[in-house]
Amino acid sequence: MQYITSDPKIHLVERILKEPQLTVTHLVLRAGEVMHEHLAPSDALVIPFKGKLMFFGEAGSNAQEIQPGMIVRLTEGEAHALEALEDSELMVVKMILASA
């Protein structure tokens, strides 16, 4: 068992775990900050645990407000962007899934 602690004082991005098939990234965004559209490099889960964010699909489509208690699942290559509506924190879990 391994316990890993993130740094609540970081601004923007902190990679807290990186293994061949799993990466966990801690994101901290202040209200109004934007992560512009980019592609998911692998399948991923976006898990907010503080604040509220607006999550967007490709070209601003499929907008959804997300907050703690919600999870966004992305597939590899899926375009997305987000904007912090409040000071926010989230974890992004990137995973390479085994072929069936």
Image: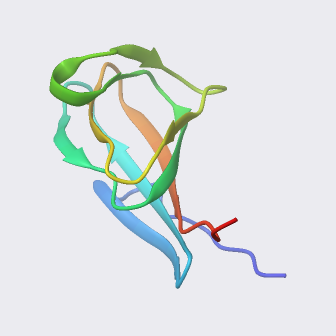
Looking at the rendering, which quadrant does residue 79 occupy? Answer: top left
| Percent x, y of residue 50 | 52, 32
Q: Image height check: is 8 above or below 97?
A: above
Residue drawn 50% across the image and 52% down it: 44
Residue drawn 18% across the image and 34% down it: 34
Looking at the rendering, which quadrant does residue 64 occupy? Answer: top left
Image quadrant containing the C terminus: bottom right
Residue drawn 45% across the image and 41% down it: 89
Residue drawn 61% across the image and 26% down it: 70
Residue closest to the far right? 1
| Percent x, y of residue 47 | 56, 40
| Percent x, y of residue 82 | 28, 31
Image quadrant containing the N terminus: bottom right
User: In front here: 26 or 23?
Assistant: 23
| Percent x, y of residue 72 | 52, 33
User: In front here: 31 or 72?
Assistant: 72
